[in-house]
């Protein structure tokens, strides 16, 4: 089964939404090995899965935050190249978190790319897609997703091959 991708464009920006697939393939991604990521989710399984995908790709610099409050503190202390945000059951709080990031006084932090991982139901209608765009989320990855689709999103937001 091939991975499906949907690109929804606006005048000045676009949100890429990936309809992921399950895949057991692991691919080394040396172009990302020096990158730093903050993984934000309250779900232990999701945290360990995302971290393992990154480790398998040669990415060793990851921070993990179990709550949005912890994530803000972690992000304020150390610069990260991107934030991987699994919304879980906290859709509204996740949106508030992204708004806090985008409105942060530290311009490096406010410009940090955000990849949102969420369930398909959360982005099925056009209003939700418009809200995602307005929040400043750079890319959306729908569950279930493959390691390849996550790393593809990361490469796209960081503009590396």
Image: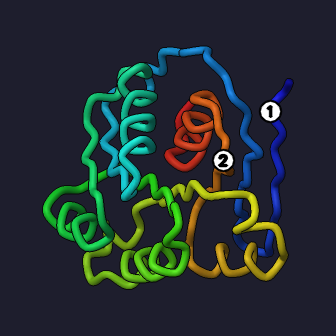
Q: Is residue 39 left or right of residue 87?
A: left
Between circles 2 and 1, the one closer to the viewer is: 2
Residues packed near mark 1 inside 10 Å, few (<14), some (14 to 19) or many (20 plus) = some
- Relative depth, front residue between 23 and 10: 23
Q: Is label 2 in a helix, a strand or a loop?
A: loop
Q: Which residue is mark 1?
A: 3
On the picture, is 46 further left or further right than 128? left
Relative vertical location of residue 38 with respect to residue 21 in this rendering, above or below: below
Residue 67 in the image: state x and y as whole percent. Answer: 30, 66
**CA separation, marks 2 and 1?**
12 Å
Residue 14 is situated, as x and y percent measured from the top left of the image, at 72, 64
Dot label at residue 47: none
Which residue is labeled 2 in the image?
143
SS assignment at label 1: loop
- Residue appearing at x 67%, y 42% in the figure: 144
Q: Quadrant of the N terminus?
A: top right
Residue at 81% from the left image edge and 55% from the top image edge: 7
Residue visible at 25% across and 70% down in the picture: 72
Q: Residue at x 48, y 21 (%)?
A: 29
Whether residue 15 is situated above or below residue 37 in the rendered picture: below
For the C terminus, the image quarter is top right
Quadrant housing residue 3: top right
Q: Which of pointers 2 and 1 lies earlier in the amino acid sequence?
A: 1
Is 149 left, or right, of 70 in this rendering?
right
Q: Is disc 2 surrounded by few (<14), some (14 to 19) or many (20+) residues within 10 Å?
A: some
Asked if 12 appears above or below 4 in the picture, the reply is: below
Tell which residue pokes out farthest to the left in this image.
Answer: 77
Q: Quick check: 79 left or right of 47?
A: left
Vertically, is 63 above or below 155? below
User: Toward the viewer: 96 or 47?
Assistant: 47
Q: Between residues 26 and 78, which one lies in front from this camera angle?
A: 26
């Amino acid at each position: 089964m091939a991975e499906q991708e949907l690109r929804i464009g606006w005048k000045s920006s676009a949100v890429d939404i990936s309809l992921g697939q399950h895949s057991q393939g692991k691919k080394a991604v040396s172009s990302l090995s020096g990158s730093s990521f903050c993984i934000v989710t309250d779900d232990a399984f999701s945290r360990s899965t995302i971290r393992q995908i990154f480790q398998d790709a040669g990415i060793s610099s990851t921070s993990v935050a179990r709550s949005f409050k912890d994530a803000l503190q972690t992000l304020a202390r150390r610069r990260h190249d991107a934030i991987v945000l699994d919304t879980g059951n906290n859709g509204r709080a996740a949106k508030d978190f992204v708004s806090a990031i985008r409105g942060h006084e530290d311009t490096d932090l406010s410009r940090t790319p955000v990849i949102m991982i969420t369930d398909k139901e959360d982005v099925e209608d056009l209003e939700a897609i418009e809200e995602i765009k307005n929040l400043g989320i750079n890319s959306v990855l729908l569950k279930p997703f493959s390691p390849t689709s996550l790393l593809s999103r990361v490469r796209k937001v960081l503009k590396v091959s």
